[in-house]
Image: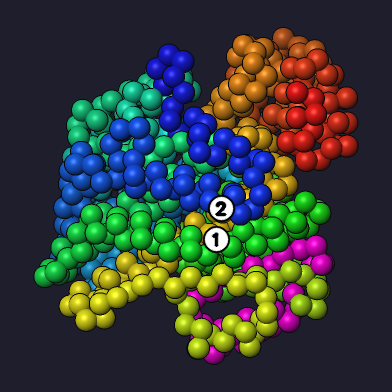
Amino acid sequence: MQGNVIPITEQFNNITQDIDRANSEEIVKLLYKSDLEIFNGWEGYQNVLSSEILAVVQEVSSLAVQYVKPDTKNAGIILSGCGTSGRIAFFISRKFNEFAKGQNLRPCYRYIISGGDPALMMSVESCEDDWNAGKRELENAAEGFDKVLYVAITCGLSAPFVGGQVEYCLQHLQKFTPYLLGFNPTNQARSAAIRGTDKVMLDVALEMEAKGRLLNPVVGPEPITGSSRMKGGTTTKMLLEAIFLTAHQKAANEATPIPYDDIIKTYLITLNLTHTKDAEISSLIKMAGNSLVKGGSVSYIGWGSLGIMGMIDAAECVPTFGANHDDVRCFLESGYKILRNAQGNLSSQGEALEIGFDNFIEKRGPKLSKIDTVIFIVQDLSSEQKLGLRRIVELVKSRKSNIAIIAVNSNNDNWQIHDIFGDSLTINIVLPSTGREQNSNKQFYKFLDQCTTEVSFKWVINAVSTGAHILKGKVYKNCMIDLKLTNRKLFERGVRIVTQFSNISSEVAKECLLKSIYRQDVLNLNMVEADVSEHVLKAGYVDRVIPLAILLTKGFKVDLGMKMLVDCPIVRECIENCM
């Protein structure tokens, strides 16, 4: 970031500036308008269909062709990111390896996520700051490859973890061909100092731009400020799918390939069709929000890739909204067997990493009550899968919990929704595949159908979890007011939030933020002089850091501020009462 310019990915979105006062119907409409900026562009910047972006997309796709061809040896594609970006890197790698096997191409994709595989299911944000750890992880991931096509994903062009990896690639160009993917203009890449190097992310972005290896369409500010799990995550998924789907078509010598432009336009059609179900989506937001407001939980029960998208959404609620890890959880059929992550079964490492149906049935299910909500995420299920589904539905009904179903491109006749669920709230989205059955390129259109099914579901489930937390009061204006400050980027965001809402200097805002983190009315010298890395280590275990800091700017003492937040648990209302 240059001077006092706030990067676009960290700016307030004018469309959603009053989303905290919106009802569930209005929330869905505002999110739709914000997502349209992905395709329509934002304030004249290059977008996903701009010629500059298309040129880099075509270059990456052409390179990828050689990596996936069956006669290629010792070459691989590595996707890397932190938080949402790392989860999408995992999702894309898993998906295209499976697709490649069905095409007799090479399943040569690998992923890196900062914090390792536990970060797929839970927040491990602090690892994002480690420049040198990123290098080590890349060395390990690239073992056995002589050539690597590497894509670093950082929505704000801000993550030191991948910055270190890009530098490592540039130092070893005989092996690595690196590209950088993000959603800010180059001059808005992060310029804050990084421990372990004299470089900043701006240096990395400028060097990659000079080499023609920067892929940075601008999709506008996030609907919830800085929440890159939404537009950033969605656009990352769509771009990588378009790039590698194009590559696989070329590698398979497809005579009538689907062009990049058509793939992107298909996603736009999907967005519009998804929002024909706004009434049902808003009803589900009310249901989930009511559960969270009453102190209940929301559970996702999922199969296949849609279930994994649900897992990603649930993992992101903790750092985004300061939620407890039990507030929103996802459980998958076959657990780690269907996940197929690199580190295997992690369930012994803690309850947050227990993700199988058996974990739900044995532990979470018996504790459900009428204030909880369970959302079933389905496509077409086999007879055996339906038996498992019935068992879980019967358990949930016995606990008198709320039930909802999200079905995208599901065959209702075979699936028998009403037979299993009765009159439960159902969001049933059917996306068109007109004419594709007659097309010679059938396998690729079928794959694109699955891509659009997943992104449609992502739009729905992001709206539900975001809307539910808005109704719980976890958003002030369009800012995630109760986020966890678990890395340097989030600490900087916290200072900026307190500065803007309290109309004070950044120095005073930082002082109040530190008082909130350490729960002290007077800071000692060690606290003041400590590095940000020490502050975020402490902040990761403290609740309501930003809300308390804002109250402190109004003259409240720590104890009184915390009492007010306890007495008024809806953070937005508490802050407004004091403003």
Left or right, residue 211 beside residue 282: left
Relative to residue 82, is residue 346 depicted above or below?
below
Residue 278 shows which numbered tag?
A: 1
- The residue type indicated by label 2 comes to Val
Left or right, residue 393 beside residue 335: right
Seen at 88% across and 37% down, the residue is 567
Relative to residue 532, is residue 278 depicted above or below?
below
- The residue type indicated by label 1 comes to Asp
Task: Report crowding for label 1: few under 14, some 14 to 19, many 20 or more residues within 10 A (C-alpha).
Answer: many
Task: Report crowding for label 2: few under 14, some 14 to 19, many 20 or more residues within 10 A (C-alpha).
Answer: many
Seen at 23% across and 73% down, the residue is 104
Residue 211 shows which numbered tag?
A: none
Q: Quadrant of residue 498?
A: top right
**Kind of element beneath mark 2:** helix
Q: Which residue is mark 2?
A: 28
Left or right, residue 150 beside residue 84: left
- The magenta span reads 368-396
Q: Nearer the viewer, residue 270 or 159?
A: 270
Q: Quadrant of residue 513?
A: top right
Residue 305 among those drawn in magenta: no
